[in-house]
Amino acid sequence: MTIIALCSYIAVAAVILTFIMDRYFHVVKNFFVSVLQNFCGGLFIVSGFVKAVDPLGTAYKMEEYFKEFEYTAKGSFLNFCADIFPLMAKYAIGFSVFMIVLEIVVGIMLIVGHKPRLTSWLFFLTIIFFTILTGFTYMTGYVPTDANFFQFSKWGDYNYENMRVKGCGCFGDFIKLEPKVSFIKDLFLLIPSILFLFFHKKFHTIFSNGIRNALAVLSLVGLLLFCLANYKWNEPMVDFRPFSAGADIKTQKQAEAKAEADVEIESWKLQNINSSEIKIVKNEEYMTNFKSYPKTEWKVIDQIKTKMAIPRTKISDFAMFDLENTEYTNTILDEPRSRIMINCPKLYYTTTTQVNTVMDTLWKTDTIVKDKKSAPEYIQSIAEIKEKKVKSNTYTWNEEYKKKFTEKIIPFLDSVYQDSVKAYIVCGGASEDAIAGLFNQLPMKATILLADEILLKTIMRSNPGVVLWRNGKIIQKWHFNHLPDMTDMRRDYLDWNARPIH
């Protein structure tokens, strides 16, 4: 699905709906305005719904934005408001749910024509907010990584790698939009949002005022519960991510690696050191006439490459290591038997640092040579004894988070161990010392591995969550609140041909 195709479907539906409203219900005051109402309302409902099935995904994206906004504000005239963004990041999930519910409710209110003036302003302000996000995403592509967004004199040519936030998340993981396309989309939506402010009296309205009020309230409550169900109580009901159940991660990772290896350099972008002239030279010419562009006169500022045959996803970043930094990626992907992975993107705990005084003994060695024929003797003696301060960290689980392991995960693992299923606990967002110290406090036999926090958040939203692997494929995923009993597990998921490992 592309944004053009999606908008085309919604536009056709908007025209048909407007025709029905006009022909059979006679509620249309201005056909063009009603088409815009239905189109914008439908787009908001679809855009909001694909995010409502995964509110945590939107929350993670907002955390990225707030982090970059804080950095940008601190280095500019907006320094006075920089401290608000860490606070907003702390409550990113609440902000995410609020924006998702608002987007869908505004879409519904547009289609039914409820409270035209209020709806027009809500739509306008929402579009302004989205335009700021997508505009920031796209325009940071012109800002060098060592420059602040507001240092306009340092802006240069567009470079995707310069972007502070990769992607806007407008349609969640359902449609991945290029930053420029996303920004243009919001600029386009600014047109009807401004028109609505002046022509809201031309809105069509359907149903009675009481029914519209009830619809707005029920939508608000229902959508709030729907969002909670998709992150707090269970995994997203629809999984648009590359790590969905049934995905062949091993095959896809190999395909993406090959596609990346097949990328070729088409041209070189050069800049003259003295005149600042920009020149794009074909790769063949550059390689043939390399001496014509000496480093004393020209510097390479970019390589123009062919596109990958298939798009790169987070699967390319799939990598796991043990606490000794030994890679386990292929161990997991090549394993033909069923394996359980406990997915822990972030561990919740507190750290207490204690300073202890110990006696540090310094030794000296004397060499005694009696004669040339005898071997030298080495005699050690104490040179100095002094006090030494040694820091040690004690890690303590957050009790609520610990209960998820003691009451849910550990009993589940004890059951699957009886069926020869080995388990891995994969953690992110904590040091090796903290991870080892924390899991030593729990009666668990599983191998502990490390992985990138963002990767683990992409694999599962539940923390902790359970993933069943076999032959490099994700067989199924479970929220810690919805772990299967062993009867269902054995019947539906476990490979009975697995060779015992215990």
Image (cartoon, grey):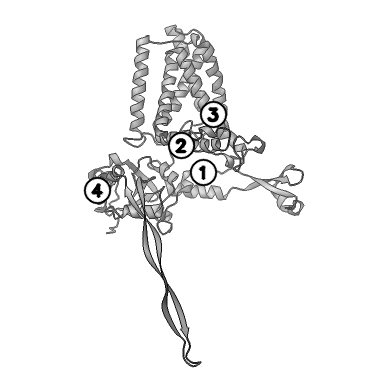
Residue placed most toward the observer, 365 or 419: 365
Dot placed on the residue nearer the N-terminal end, 4 or 1: 1
- Name the mark nearer the viewer: 2 or 3: 2
Which amino acid is tagged 1?
Arg
Residue at image mark 3: 132
Dot placed on the residue nearer the N-terminal end, 3 or 4: 3
Which amino acid is tagged 4?
Pro
Label 1: which secondary element: loop
- Disc ID at residue 312: 1
Residue at image mark 2: 86
* Residue at 36% from the left image edge and 46% from the top image edge: 347
Q: Is residue 158 left or right of residue 448?
A: right
* Residue at 51% from the left image edge and 26% from the top image edge: 129
Q: CA distance from mark 4 to mark 1?
A: 38 Å
Residue placed most toward the observer, 161 or 78: 78
Dot placed on the residue nearer the N-terminal end, 1 or 3: 3
Label 4: which secondary element: helix
Which residue extends farthest left? 487
Q: CA distance from mark 1 to mark 3?
A: 27 Å
**In this orientation, does residue 310 appear?**
yes
Residue at image mark 4: 411
